[in-house]
Image (cartoon, rainbow, N blue to C red):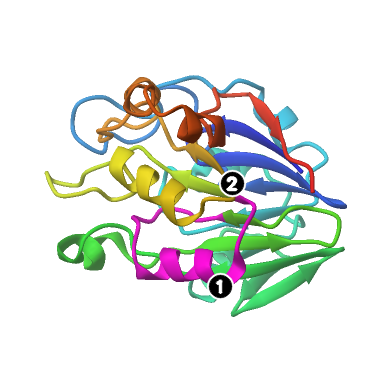
């Protein structure tokens, strides 16, 4: 397994016989939205040209339709016939953009040798859930790879804890910028929630993404590293990649 962080939640994932692009947000720096009224996001440039990011991808996986996970720039670059996997609730909207091979995932799908299972989550505390809408993560399994749980835009909640207990993933990707919406949050995990993930999944490697890209974040790469600087055991299992960095995990 190779996980390349592109930026924010956008990943290129090489998993068994598939190359997957996850939650593509391909806007140039400063050409997206401001989520807190401070600065237009994304706050950083893409580490690669969009065509290189999209190139040789077998399928795209989309967790939800917020603009920092699937934007107009991604929609303009992606081929209309590329397979797109998404939760059933989002399928019609994606088809309306002109994509012809949209697979609505109710529970799970098989893509080549990879089983991809839909997982649940909560995009913040109760008071913002109606505004944030439903979100999903995905579990990736293949006989020749470690099990990967990509939690998506979610806080630490019952759905996440139960998925970790049920599937015992060897690798967990969490979104860890602790973003807020109108002063309420976090909308995704923060330092303390990442610490709990390390505790409830003691055998897993944790990859923290969705950092240093949006203006409503409260957690950064530097604050996350500082939080764990005195915990040597946790630091060995926590990976905080830079944009463009690739991390490999073997079964």
- Tell me the residue that label 1 is attached to: 166
In magenta stretch: residue 27:
no
In magenta stretch: residue 167:
yes
Near-viewer residue (48 or 72) = 48
Name the mark on residue 23.
none
Residue 147 in sight in this render: yes
**Circle 2 residues within 10 Å: few <14, some 14–19, many ≥20:** some
**Where does the magenta region start and end?**
150-171
**Circle 1 residues within 10 Å: few <14, some 14–19, many ≥20:** few
Residue 93 in sight in this render: no
What x and y, as percent, mark residue 108? Answer: 66, 75
What x and y, as percent, mark residue 190? Answer: 31, 41
Q: Residue at x 52, y 63 (%)?
A: 164
Q: Relative to residue 74, is residue 192 drawn left or right?
A: left
What x and y, as percent, mark residue 107? Answer: 61, 79
- Tell me the residue that label 2 is attached to: 75
Q: Relative to residue 5, is residue 249 drawn left or right?
A: right
Q: Element at badge 1?
A: helix
What x and y, as percent, mark residue 169? Answer: 62, 58
**Which circle, 1 or 2, is nearer the viewer?**
1
Chain-order first, disc 1 or disc 2: 2
């Amino acid at each position: 397994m190779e996980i390349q962080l592109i930026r924010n939640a956008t990943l290129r994932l090489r998993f068994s016989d598939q190359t997957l692009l996850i939650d593509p947000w391909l806007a140039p720096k400063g050409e997206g939205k401001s989520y807190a009224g401070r600065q237009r996001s994304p706050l950083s440039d893409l580490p690669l040209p969009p065509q290189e990011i999209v190139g040789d991808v077998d399928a795209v996986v989309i967790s939800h339709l917020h603009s920092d996970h699937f934007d107009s720039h991604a929609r303009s670059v992606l081929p209309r016939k590329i397979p797109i996997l998404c939760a059933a609730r989002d399928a019609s909207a994606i088809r309306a953009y002109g994509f012809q091979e949209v697979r609505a995932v109710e529970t799970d799908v098989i893509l080549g040798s990879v089983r991809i299972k839909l997982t649940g989550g909560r995009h913040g505390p109760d008071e913002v859930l109606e505004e944030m809408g439903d979100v999903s993560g995905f579990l990736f399994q293949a006989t020749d790879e470690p099990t990967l749980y990509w939690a998506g835009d979610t806080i630490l909640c019952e759905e996440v804890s139960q998925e970790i207990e049920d599937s015992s993933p060897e690798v967990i990707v969490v979104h860890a910028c602790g973003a807020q919406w109108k002063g309420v949050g976090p909308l995704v995990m923060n330092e303390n929630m990442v610490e709990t993930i390390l505790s409830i999944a003691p055998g897993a490697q944790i990859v923290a993404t969705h950092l240093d890209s949006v203006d409503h974040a409260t957690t950064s790469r530097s604050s996350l590293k500082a939080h764990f600087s005195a915990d040597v055991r946790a630091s060995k299992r926590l990976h905080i990649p830079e944009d463009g960095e690739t991390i490999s995990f073997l079964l």
